[in-house]
Image: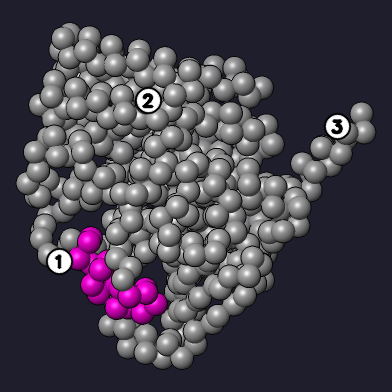
């Protein structure tokens, strides 16, 4: 299949499309002749270019009563690449060895990967000052990209879009959700909005850092001395957040990671059963703490491979054979070349919570799924439960009071997780999984995604009527 794609690529060069953007920029799109893949750039602002890659599912069905869904995958970091990590390491059709992935999410939906924000992955800015500084700015750019992709394609407009986010991508997802809904209501975006899934998402940094010490103490990775030292820094972070000093809180967060690394003999922040130094690429604990999120992602995911080396190296893959396949990456643009800057520019928003945005989405009636890996540290289940309990949503008390249902997968009866739902809020506890849930527990995750993408579509007009009633009354 891969070779046939390459053979078709030279034909693809003949079908470049240059489309005018609403803001006067250019959009560039290209794809395979059979329409199974499309990719391109959107100039979301002058000199700010965002890369996207769309896969049409070979399992796609034509059912007017149950339209086939599209999943927009948003990676975290900030600065980690959805086109690279999410695609080749987690849920796309091929793995980083270019072998078919049996657990690809194409079994349940079409997939749209985006290198977001600009500066991430293949996305780039021509001037550094154009990098985003807030989650809202990232959401505005993503909304512009969705307008360009969906408004010109009536086929895509018939498929509901579901946003799935991982890690820091959760903050992008909730701000994008509100931005996209506003654009749909204003008739600027032609899109069926399905819902949002937050996977191990950095929604409330304060609650997560407060969970690290107690969690690691409970699983014997910290002792009382390590817990005391880490909790002292947590109190400092809480005060900095309360005072609106988010950049200072980001610096203290980095200090806290170093303290925990030193006291736990370098526990892996993505899976507390592992050490950071267990990956094939030799790095000291201090180097791992200082590494960019994109590099830390790849180090951890590399550690899960059975044959580490050149054939599975994501950097080599994306800057080599994939770059050649795509054929439109400008000279001088290296995959991940600006990713470190993305984190630097967002450091003032990194520790800002987005619980309020989750409340707004729930109150609008948007289907919201939250899932968390049992073994994650950086976005621990303990921290996620803490911020969920802070929601002001009217259904929260009932949600918290109901019992969980066990999850199984395949022929076995071994418990794979738990779930519970009330109205439009759904929570999944995934056992045996770290930060990268689709990698660690692909079977139960696919089942979850099936339920999520068949959970209904957000009724924009109904919400608009409610707003009109409020104004009238």
Give the Cα separation between the discs numbered 2 and 1: 39 Å
Give the Cα separation between the discs numbered 3 and 2: 39 Å
How far across and how far down the image is residue 397, in percent? 59, 17
What segment is highlighted magenta in the picture? Answer: 314-331
Q: Earlier in the sequence, mark 1 or mark 3?
A: 1
Q: Could you tell whether 414 is left or right of 393 in the image? A: left
Residue under pointer 2: 249
Please say if 23 is above or below 469.
below
Residue at (23%, 49%) from the top-left corner? 295
Residue at (34%, 49%) from the top-left corner? 341
How far across and how far down the image is residue 209, in percent? 34, 23
Residue 207 is marked as none
Q: Secondary structure at mark 3?
A: helix
Please say if 52 is above or below 239.
below
**Relative depth, front residue between 445 and 373:** 373
Residue under pointer 3: 470
Q: How is the image coloured?
A: one colour
In this view, the residue farthest toward the right is 472
Specify whether residue 12 is painted magenta. Answer: no
How many marks are shown on the rendered structure?
3
Residue 311 is marked as 1
User: Can the viewer see residue 461?
Assistant: yes
**Relative depth, front residue between 364 and 128:** 128
How far across and how far down the image is residue 93, in percent? 35, 65
Q: Secondary structure at mark 2?
A: helix
Q: Quadrant of the C terminus?
A: top right
Q: Could you tell whether 424 is left or right of 77 in the image? A: right
């Amino acid at each position: 299949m891969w070779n046939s794609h390459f053979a078709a690529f030279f034909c693809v060069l003949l079908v470049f499309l240059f489309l005018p953007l609403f803001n006067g920029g250019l959009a560039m799109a290209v794809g395979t002749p059979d329409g199974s893949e499309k990719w391109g750039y959107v100039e979301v602002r002058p000199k700010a270019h965002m890369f996207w890659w769309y896969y049409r599912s070979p399992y796609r069905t034509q059912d007017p009563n149950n339209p086939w869904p599209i999943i927009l995958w948003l990676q975290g970091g900030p600065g980690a690449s959805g086109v690279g990590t999410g695609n080749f390491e987690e849920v796309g059709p091929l793995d980083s060895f270019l072998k078919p992935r049996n657990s690809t999410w194409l079994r349940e939906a079409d997939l749209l990967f985006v290198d977001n924000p600009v500066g991430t992955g293949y996305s780039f800015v021509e001037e550094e000052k154009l990098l985003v500084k807030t989650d809202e700015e990232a959401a505005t750019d993503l909304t512009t990209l969705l307008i360009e992709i969906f408004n010109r394609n009536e086929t895509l407009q018939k498929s509901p879009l579901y946003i799935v986010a991982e890690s820091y991508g959760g903050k992008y997802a909730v701000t994008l959700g509100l931005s996209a809904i506003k654009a749909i209501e204003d008739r600027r975006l032609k899109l069926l909005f399905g819902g949002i899934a937050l996977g191990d998402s950095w929604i409330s940094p304060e609650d997560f850092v407060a969970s690290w010490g107690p969690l690691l103490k409970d699983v014997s990775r910290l002792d009382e001395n390590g817990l005391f030292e880490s909790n002292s820094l947590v109190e400092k972070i809480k005060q900095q957040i309360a005072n609106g000093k988010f950049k200072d809180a980001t610096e203290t967060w980095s200090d806290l990671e170093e303290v925990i690394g030193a006291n736990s003999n370098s526990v892996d922040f993505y899976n507390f059963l592992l050490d950071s130094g267990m990956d094939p690429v030799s790095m000291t604990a201090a180097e791992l703490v200082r590494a960019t999120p994109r590099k830390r992602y790849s180090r951890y995911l590399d550690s899960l491979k059975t044959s580490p080396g050149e054939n599975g190296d994501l950097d080599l893959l994306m800057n080599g054979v994939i770059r050649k396949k795509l054929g439109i990456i400008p000279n001088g643009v290296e995959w991940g070349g600006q990713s470190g800057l993305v984190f630097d520019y967002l450091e003032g928003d990194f520790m800002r919570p987005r619980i309020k945005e989750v409340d707004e989405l729930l109150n609008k009636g948007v289907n919201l799924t939250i899932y968390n890996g049992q073994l994650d540290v950086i976005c621990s289940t303990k921290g996620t439960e803490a911020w969920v309990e802070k929601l002001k949503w009217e259904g929260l008390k009932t949600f918290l009071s109901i019992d969980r249902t066990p999850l199984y997968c395949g022929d076995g009866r071994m418990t794979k997780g738990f779930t519970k739902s009330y109205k439009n809020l759904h929570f999944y506890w995934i056992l045996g999984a770290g930060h990268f849930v689709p990698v660690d527990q692909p079977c139960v995750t696919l089942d979850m995604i099936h339920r999520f993408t068949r959970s209904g579509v957000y009724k924009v007009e109904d919400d608009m009527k409610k707003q009109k009633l409020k104004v009238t009354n």
